[in-house]
Amino acid sequence: MLETISSVVNGAAGAAKASTVTQSSPALPQAAGPALGFEGVMEQVAADAISTMKAGEAASISGMQGKVSAQRVVEAMMSAERTLQMAVAVRDKVVQAYQEVSRMAI
């Protein structure tokens, strides 16, 4: 499951890298640190999603061992479920965008 999330996000980041358009505007001030592009944001989202999924797995294992309350297990699992649903939604949107671009007349 975690590999699927990583592959979805890596595919989206690769597509973004292939079609990167940079614009520089003198009206917009530059941030003190390096600005995250689409690829950086997707990598960060993937890392957060993977850590949430791992936390859900760890909570469920701890719950089975009796170390964590059932409420915390349910909260962690619901958070992991929301994360998985978000990853699937992002994947669907990336596929849909790719299909729309591929149908464009040149």
Image: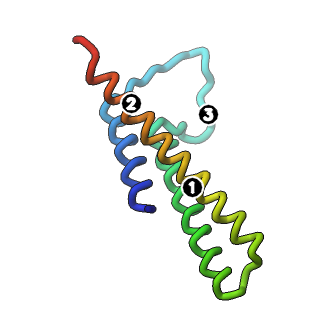
Say whether disc 2 or disc 3 marks the residue closer to the N-terminus.
3
Q: Which residue is mark 2?
A: 96
11 horizontally vs 89: left or right: left
Q: Nearer the viewer, residue 95 or 16?
A: 95
Q: Secondary structure at mark 2?
A: helix
Q: Secondary structure at mark 3?
A: loop
Q: Which residue is mark 3?
A: 31
Say whether disc 2 or disc 1 marks the residue closer to the N-terminus.
1
Specify the amino acid type for callout 3: Ala
* CA–CA distance in space, label 2 to label 3: 32 Å
Marks 2, 3: nearer the viewer: 2
Marks 2, 1: nearer the viewer: 2
**Residue 76: quadrant of the picture:** bottom right
Q: Which residue is mark 1?
A: 48
87 horizontally vs 68: left or right: left
Whether label 2 touches label 3, CB < 8 Å: no
- The image quadrant where one finds the N terminus is bottom left
